[in-house]
Amino acid sequence: MLKREPRTKNQNSKNDMNRLSQNSLSFPQGLVMALSLTLVSCIGEKAVVQNSADVVIIPDANLVASFDLAATQNAPIYMSMLGLNREDIAAAQLLTNASGRMEMLSNIAMETLGITEKDVSRVTMSAKMDEPLGMDLEEGSADSPDAALAMLLTRQERLEKAEIAIGLEVSKSITVDQLEAFFDAIPTENEDALKMKRANLSGNDCLVMRTTDGESYLTVVSKGRVILGGTRKGIENAVQRANNPVPLGTALAAGGMPSGKTPDWFISMILSDAMKAEMAASQGFTTNGKGMEAVLASCFEGMHGATVAAEVGDKIDLKVHVKLASEEKADRLVGVLDNTAIALLKLAVSMLSEGRPMPILDTIVTSHTGDTANLELSLTEEDLDALNTAPESQ
């Protein structure tokens, strides 16, 4: 095991930056820090990289989210999305860097990995959990310290059993040696804050990081262009999927993901049998209710999953796909949307915009393709500007 030695304030960092790692990195905090270090101040630069979001999706994942950072930040509508102008963003970046934390991590990333924020193209997360992370303990069972500790341990054990993989696509090839150098270069005053060792998972060289909260794993796939981090099971399965990639439309078919081009953004959820049972037992989804509640519950009964996807350019083209138990249920849900839900949505948007023109109201379209109900709409710069300025006049 590679045990990090404590560093002095003169090593690898300025004095004021050396406080970053006084506390131990925890899972998933350490993992998120590693995979998100270049995301905070990613503005205006486009990295040209291969699209490999599908290699991060572990088999039978329940939840997948992916965001094309380069496409988003170079979209004409980006500034309106933030509700800020470039001067505001520059000021925010200066404020962020004033703490020294991001500046230090960026410098270390450049020295050890050879990348900056502009080299990050897409971030993708996928997860498969055999059971929910809820405590499943009776109300009032945490009245004592011992019971509270048991709740935390139960949650941690479930997290360790979960399959989680997070991937960053970068424009340059990265090695595990470089990842180890990156973490080793982060200064710390606690010699037990982070311990590292090398391992082999599914034929891939891997960096194992142990903290007080457990272990997380890092490796690289797709010829070093995708950095993978997550739990042991998640990384093992993600590596296997990376060696035999499956198109998104196939991997996430149960979530309603259409085949074809990978969306700039998407979040896809596939309901497990346990989730379906929990939904069926939920008071809000009972078919024994009355009126609209019963109709919606009937539509969603047996639902397989849902996907929200978007393309970003001059406008945001948003699509929602809900895969239901049958074509009949999909047709019924579309009818509910057309007759009631969309009218309420238009009323709410009009109230938020205080009467300003909202082109989005004329773009809403519903349909169903077999057992999948679809909702499409387009959000323009005019819509965003109206929403961003509305609170100022109240």
Image: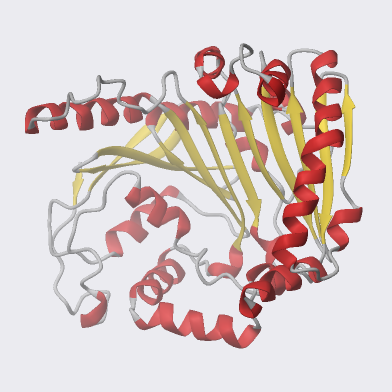
| Location of residue 37 in the rendering, given as x and y in whole percent from the top left corner | 44, 62
Specify the quadrant of the image occupied by residue 312. Answer: bottom right
Examine the rendering and report whether any part of residue 74 can be seen: no
Residue 67 vs 245, above or below: the answer is below
The quadrant of the picture occupied by the C terminus is bottom right
State the colouring used for the structure image: secondary structure
Residue farthest left in this picture: 145
Residue 175 appears left or right of 8: right
| Location of residue 392 in the rendering, given as x and y in whole percent from the top left corner | 62, 79
| Location of residue 306 in the rendering, given as x and y in whole percent from the top left corner | 68, 30
Residue 311 appears left or right of 208: right
Front position in the image: 11 or 38? 38
Front position in the image: 136 or 26? 136
Residue 16 appears left or right of 338: left
Front position in the image: 330 or 254? 330
The quadrant of the picture occupied by the N terminus is top left
Residue 190 vs 117, above or below: the answer is above
Specify the quadrant of the image occupied by residue 339. Answer: top right
Q: Tell me the residue at 18%/53% (across/down).
A: 193
Q: Tell me the residue at 26%/20% (across/down).
A: 137
